[in-house]
Image (tube, rainbow, N blue to C red):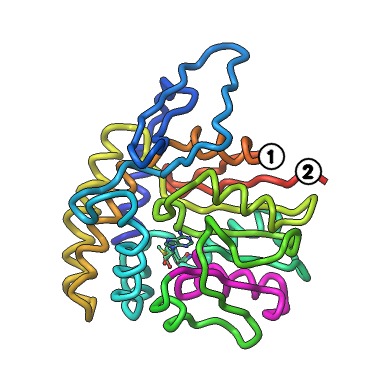
Amino acid sequence: MCYLFLQALARAAKGQKSRHFMSGYCYCGGLPQPFAVARAPGLNRRIHGLMQAPHPPLKQYYGTESARPEWVRGIFTRTAADYERIESAMAFGSGSWYRRRALRACGLGPGMRTVDVGVGTGLVARAAAAIIGDPALVTGVDPSPGMLANAHVPVGVSLIMGSAEALPLPDACADFLSMGYALRHIGDLTAAYAEFFRVLRPGGLLCVLEITMPKGPIARAMLKGYMRGVVPWLSRVLARHSDMPELMRYYWDTIEACVPPETVMQGISNAGFVDVARHVELGIFSAYSARRPA
Ligand SMILES: C[S@@+](CC[C@H](N)C(=O)[O-])C[C@H]1O[C@@H](n2cnc3c(N)ncnc32)[C@H](O)[C@@H]1O
């Protein structure tokens, strides 16, 4: 059912050109400041040094931006034991096959030292370990103790508590850095991209997977109906923890409010990465790839 739905969604996803070259929310003195830079020839304003959240505070879940990290850590911890069951039922992220394919497409190969940020229960880390051929070369990082406690990873994979904005890892220690479906939950994209750049060795590769809003209005309405109707119902039936329907509602709200792909790509480029690209599947699965210059 999920696959048929996604196919229909893909058919409905039509290309509408973005009116903005870059837009999003900067945080200055703790207050969200929306910004939008109009498309203009030669214009490439940089936003170095400004904190940039993926979306404005979602006040129905946490009151202020400063309350966000604890709320996010808490809900992922409380629902961790159910995460993989719900993830596979709703097909977002599309399981291991899509993650494996996307990692390969971003350049992951045998023997590469890999850091997986927002490792969760290990779906990306497992796929990476299978490609690399040696689990000891994989390190997973996540701020949620519950997710780390429920991680199912091959023996040898290291799991460390930490967040994307301050990775507890040395400079230039990785050949490849992945982050699967965590971008919408981190507090400061500018800091996260800078950390990815620092931790990758010169020439190292970046791969960020995320769900993005389809462009056509029909596809958007279908996705919203699915996320607001089917998924909360599924999670009520399948999950053991009563917070899972709330996590699914929050998922949709973060997808809807998230900065557009152009802003993600610009932010990655501003951090110093080159060859920044986005590959989209079914209109909603985005794989961003980039390289730290040699
Ligand atoms: C939707 S899960 C994705 C897990 C896994 N990567 C996957 O593909 O299934 C999002 C993960 O991001 C983590 N997360 C939340 N805030 C984060 C942050 N600031 N830095 C890194 N990870 C974060 C959550 O704890 C959660 O484990």
The residues colored magenta run 118-143
Crowding near the residue tagged with mark 2, few <14, some 14–19, many ≥20 C-alpha atoms within 10 Å: some
Q: Residue 14 location in percent, x, y?
A: 38, 31
Q: Is residue 130 magenta?
A: yes
- Where residue 141 sits in the image (x, y, percent)? 55, 69
Residue in the image at 45% along x and 40% along y: 52
Answer above or below: position of 98 versus 237: above
Comparing 30 with 205, the one in front is: 30
Residue type (three-letter) at the residue carrying disc 2? Pro
Q: Is residue 82 above or below residue 215?
A: below
Residue linked to disc 1: 272
User: Horizontally, is 146 left or right of 96 in the view?
Assistant: left
**Image height of 57 relative to 74, above or below:** above
- Counting residues from the N terminus, which is met first, the one under dot 1 or under dot 2? 1
| Residue contact at pointers 1 and 2, CB within 8 angstroms | yes
Picture residue at 42% right of the left edge, 51% below the top: 187
Residue at image point 20% right, 59% down: 230
Depicted 276 relative to depicted 16: above or below: below
Label 1 secondary element: loop
Q: Residues within 10 Å of mark 1 (few under 14, many from 20)?
A: some
**Callout 1, which amino acid?**
Gly
Name the residue beneath numbered marker 2. Answer: 293
Q: Residue furthest right?
A: 294
- Residue 172 placement: quadrant: bottom right
Seen from the viewer's position, the closer of residues 55 and 156 is: 55
Pick out the residue farthest to the front: 29
